[in-house]
Each structure stands twice: as C-alpha cells, then as structure tokens.
C-alpha cells in the first residue's frame, strides 16, 4: 500500500464490503466464489476531485456488477493479479500495469482474480468533462464515453502512467493535492489530456457554441475576474461565465483584444503575484512554497519563466528580501 493512502475498509464480510463501498462508488451486486478467502481492503488518498484508491477482495474470484457511476470517472490498473472488465458486448482482461478507463455512463461487470489488487485514479465527473472540453476546444462539456472495445494509444497511456506515478509517489504522500488546489487542478488536467490522447472517446452534447462579435467590455469582465480569483482553481468555463460568453467566443475575444489566451493571461497574473510575495518574503518562506501556492508545480519551469519575466531568478529575489 502506498504511503499517504489510508485504509478505509478492511473486512471479511462481503455484505459489509458491498454496503460500505457503495458509498464511495455506486450501488452494485457482489458475488464471491470463496468466502473463506475473501477479504475486502480499500484505501484512499487525495481529494473528492482527484483521488488515488486501492481495492482488493482477497484470494478468490470476486464479481461486481455496478450501475453507471454517474458522478466520477475511473482509471484502473491491477498492480497484481488479473482484472477483467466487460460492458456492452466487449471485454478486456488486464495484466498488472495495464490500465483501463471507465466512464460515468456505462454499467460495468468487473472481476477480481488471482489475489488482484487494483490501483485506481478517481476523477470527479464534472471536473473531468469540463477539463476535457477545455483541452479539446469544445464550446461546452459533453457526456464522454470510453468504448471498451477500442484499444488505447501507447503515447496517451505513457502520459497517464507518468501522472499516475507522480500522484502515487509524490502528490498524495506529501499532501500536495489537499494543500495546493492550483497544483491539483493542473494535475487533473494532465490526467484528462492523457486520457483524451489515449482513448478514442465518444462525446455527446446538445449544447451549441455561440458566435458573433464580442465587445471589449466582455474581455474587461474576464480580466477583472482573473485578477480577483487568481488564487483559485479557475477553469475556462469559469472565465467564460464571468465574461458572459461561451468558451469559444472567449478564446476568440482574447486573441483579438489581448493577443493571448485567457489561461496564458492567468499564468502571467499568477507569476506577478508570486513575484510580489518573494519581494517581501519573511524568514521561512521558500521558492517552492510560493511557486506551489500560485500553481507552478514544475520548479525548473517556474524559475525559467520567472527569470524571463523579471530578469532575475526567484531565489535571487528571495535572498534580497531578507
């Protein structure tokens, strides 16, 4: 079990396991072939928006039939044993390390075999579908499905694997997901970007985009929102709502009136806030703590962007403040 992931359930009673796990996942039917070898162990870490879960059912074969999850998306892989997923006439048998994406809208039949332990990333559906719309350029979030019969691309799986390793080894054990919401939002979007690259998703939405001319006043509303909420985990849909535009119209308006994108403008605001903090930092403040607070998870990239913007490294500015 990974450091930072706390055991929430440890029981040999299948009925107790089913009842308690339904609160975390969804109502389901649990079938156990060997009650003597049954032991449900469930551990979680992270947050409701992005979490890391471990789940095992002991040495026998355990079957789980679930209703659609509705509120979340799972990216699961066995770390030992074998795991089988079946849905809508397709089936995948997974060996250790091989991932599968389970969407919010499909009813799955799942099987744990050979003392299988499952490592799962759990993403809140709203955040997942909002980030997917931002990344893919859709004007509004859509209902996304991952057809089980379509094999994922190696490039996308590598990206998802790298983020998973960071979550399991660093972000969850350090408490970064709970203490740094801007970093959490960025990591979630990295997971979503990898999933979109890996899987041929099917999107369904009835929400049209909006077009037409956009006044500078709408851009000013967006900028005022970005300046006032820079410390929050801002999505493109949040900025669009503040500007009273569709996300697509917002992007076009920023390119026309500001010469950049809304998210790049937000990064410049956060960089300026980090600079202001470093200039007056007291004893005990570190470059890393300031960078993380303002959403810069890669310290090397933060230092390079900071130097490019302000002509000095963040550590030089911090030393001068003391």
Image (spheres, rainbow, N blue to C red):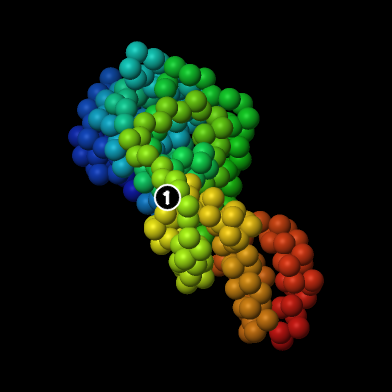
> Is residue 272 positioned above or below 256 on the image?
below
Residue at x 36%, y 19% (from the top left corner): 86
> Residue 69 is drawn in which quadrant?
top left
Q: Is 140 left, or right, of 318 in this rendering?
A: left
> Residue 304 is drawn in which quadrant?
bottom right
> Is residue 172 positioned above or below 61 on the image?
below
- Near mark 1 (Cα within 10 A), the count class, few <14, some 14-19 or many ≥20, is many
Residue at x 22%, y 28% (from the top left corner): 29
Q: Is residue 298 visible?
A: yes
Q: Is residue 264 visible?
A: no
Q: Position of residue 53 (x, y in %)?
A: 42, 43
Q: Is 6 left, or right, of 316 in this rendering?
A: left
- Residue at which label 1 appears: 246
Front residue of this view, candidates 322 and 262? 262
Residue at x 77%, y 75% (from the top left corner): 316
Q: Position of residue 9 (x, y in %)?
A: 32, 44
Front residue of this view, candidates 104 and 85? 104
């Amino acid at each position: 079990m990974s450091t930072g992931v706390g055991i929430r359930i440890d029981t040999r009673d299948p009925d107790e396991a089913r009842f308690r796990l339904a609160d975390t996942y969804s109502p389901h039917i649990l079938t156990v072939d060997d009650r003597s070898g049954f032991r449900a162990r469930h551990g979680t870490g992270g947050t409701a928006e992005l979490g890391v879960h471990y789940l095992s059912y002991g040495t026998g074969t355990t079957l789980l039939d679930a209703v659609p999850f509705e509120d979340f998306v799972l990216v699961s892989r066995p770390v030992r044993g074998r795991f089988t997923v079946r849905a809508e006439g397709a089936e995948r048998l997974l060996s250790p390390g091989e991932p599968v994406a389970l969407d919010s809208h499909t009813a799955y039949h799942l099987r744990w075999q050979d003392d299988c332990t499952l490592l799962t990333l759990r993403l809140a559906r709203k955040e997942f579908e909002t980030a997917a719309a931002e990344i893919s350029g859709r004007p509004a979030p859509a209902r996304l499905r991952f057809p089980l019969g379509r094999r994922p691309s190696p490039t996308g799986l590598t990206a998802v694997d790298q983020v998973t390793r960071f979550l399991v080894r660093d972000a969850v054990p350090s408490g970064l997901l709970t203490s740094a919401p801007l970093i959490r939002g960025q990591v979630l979007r990295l997971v979503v970007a990898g999933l979109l690259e890996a899987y041929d998703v099917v999107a369904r939405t009835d929400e049209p985009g909006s077009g037409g001319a956009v006044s500078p006043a709408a851009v000013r509303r967006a900028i005022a929102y970005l300046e006032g909420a820079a410390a929050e985990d801002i999505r493109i849909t949040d900025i669009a709502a503040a500007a009273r535009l569709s996300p697509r119209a917002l992007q076009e308006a920023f390119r026309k009136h500001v010469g950049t994108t809304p998210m790049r403008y937000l990064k410049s605001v956060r960089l300026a806030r980090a600079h202001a903090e470093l200039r007056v930092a007291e004893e005990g403040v570190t470059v890393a703590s300031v960078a993380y607070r303002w959403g810069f998870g890669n310290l090397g990239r933060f230092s390079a962007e900071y130097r490019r913007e302000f002509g000095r490294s963040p550590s030089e500015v911090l030393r001068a403040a003391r």
